[in-house]
């Protein structure tokens, strides 16, 4: 993988570009894709964002979101656009498998694949150019670096600022996590100077849910959260019945895994959701417990040191048993 800086001189020649991100895109995935979309369009490229799956309805406010093609919903259209691509940007994921059903198609294309990502252990052999830095707060910060690094900082308009800010805000826990570096704050300062209304972005993301989601959180915290104090661990398991009862849609469970971490002493929080196609795990940790390694070892996943995900094809009950076993095997790292 060549350094992404080698693309800078090539940016001035218009190309047909596709941008994609991980399945079920979150604010960082969607924000970075749309931030880059607005930038490349200004340079005269023909750009389409294709999402591997649908996304949370509370991302729809992002400027340009109405142009994003949902691969699962519009497979033929998406395939046709991908066939034309000369450049294929892959944002906010480390392995092509994170694009789910789109991965075989991406592998089959002969276009130039470019990676911009901050997850651990990227599949670099799949990309011609790219940047992978786990120390970066978010892919949005990396897209900002790409734009300013290429000498086009003056192209950052309010639409781009809103998209990029949303991702940095989400991935830093509203500027709380250690990755909220001086560079992140300098970026925010620059976006503010360009006219960003940050309060509006916070409201768009955090005050934009429907009543059912709040009721669902109440239900889950009361009835579905188990605490294993001996292992400083909390587990939430959500059944299909729960999802149906509260009419839970994509994105409605985002952030839920963080709640148990606010309990004194809890080092590991795990959440599993019984989706149709798989049991989807989310892991969060505090301090020195490495959930990237944990997710990789036990649940075919990965991510970051303190935030990772994984999957299981076993039943919900079985995968919960598997988790409890994995927790016991990790006793040394979990116990004080
Ligand atoms: P979340 O729990 O919010 O879905 O994911 C937490 C972090 O882990 C995110 O950065 C996400 O991109 C990453 N992640 C989630 N699921 C997987 C997975 O199955 N494999 C890998 N490699 N990373 C994942
Ligand atoms: Mn991210």
Image (cartoon, rainbow, N blue to C red):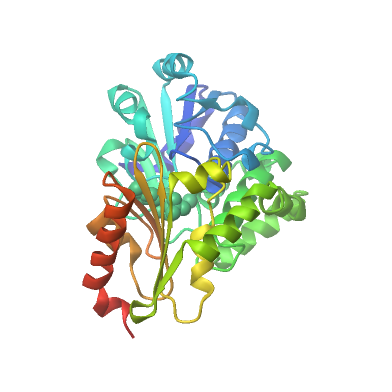
Quadrant in which the N terminus appears? top left
Q: Quadrant of residue 41?
A: top right
Can you give x and y, in whole percent of width and height, for residue 202 in the image? 70, 54
Residue 311, image x and y in percent? 32, 48
**Residue 294: x and y, percent?**
28, 62
Q: Is residue 333 left or right of residue 206?
A: left
Q: Is residue 325 above or below residue 160?
A: below
Name the image quarter holding residue 120. Answer: bottom left
Q: Could you say which is closer to the camera, residue 95 or residue 284?
A: 284
Q: Which residue is at the front of the view, 84 or 234?
A: 234
Q: Please say if 181 is above or below 38.
A: below
Which residue is painted at 38% across and 42% down in the image?
130
Q: Residue at x 64, y 28 (%)?
A: 66
Residue 69 position within the rendered picture, expressed as x and y whole percent measured from the top left: 53, 24
Disc count in the image?
0
**Can see residue 266?**
yes
Q: Is residue 328 left or right of residue 309?
A: left
The foreground one among 27 and 192 is 27
Res 311 visible: no
The quadrant the C terminus occupies is bottom left
């Amino acid at each position: 993988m060549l350094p992404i800086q080698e693309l800078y001189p090539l940016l001035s020649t218009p190309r047909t570009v596709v941008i994609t991100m991980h399945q079920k895109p979150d604010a960082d995935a969607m924000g970075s894709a749309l931030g880059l979309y607005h930038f490349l369009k200004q340079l005269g490229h023909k750009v389409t964002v294709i999402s591997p799956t649908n996304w949370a309805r509370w991302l729809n406010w992002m400027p340009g979101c109405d142009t994003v093609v949902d691969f699962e919903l519009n497979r033929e259209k998406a395939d046709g656009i991908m066939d034309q691509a000369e450049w294929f940007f892959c944002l906010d994921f480390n392995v092509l498998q994170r694009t789910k059903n789109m991965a075989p198609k991406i592998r089959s294309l002969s276009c130039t694949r470019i990676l911009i990502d901050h997850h651990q252990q990227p599949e670099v052999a799949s990309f011609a150019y790219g940047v992978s830095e786990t120390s970066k707060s978010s892919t949005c910060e990396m897209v900002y670096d790409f734009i300013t690094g290429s000498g086009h900082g003056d192209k950052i308009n309010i639409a781009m600022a809103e998209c990029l800010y949303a991702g940095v805000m989400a991935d830093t826990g509203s500027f709380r996590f250690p990755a909220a570096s001086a560079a992140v704050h300098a970026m925010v300062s620059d976006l503010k100077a360009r006219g960003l209304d940050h309060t509006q972005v916070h409201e768009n993301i955090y005050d934009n849910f429907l009543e059912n989601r709040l009721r669902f959180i109440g239900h889950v915290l009361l009835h579905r959260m188990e605490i294993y104090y001996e292992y400083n661990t909390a587990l939430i398991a959500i059944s299909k019945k729960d999802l149906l009862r509260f009419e839970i849609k994509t994105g409605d469970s985002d952030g839920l895994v963080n709640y148990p971490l606010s309990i004194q002493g809890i080092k590991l929080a795990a959440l599993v959701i019984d989706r149709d196609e798989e049991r989807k795990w989310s892991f969060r940790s505090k301090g020195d417990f490495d959930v990237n390694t944990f997710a990789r070892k036990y649940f075919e996943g990965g991510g970051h040191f303190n935030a990772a995900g994984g999957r299981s094809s076993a039943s919900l009950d079985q995968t919960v048993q598997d988790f409890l076993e994995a927790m016991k095997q990790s006793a040394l790292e979990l116990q004080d």
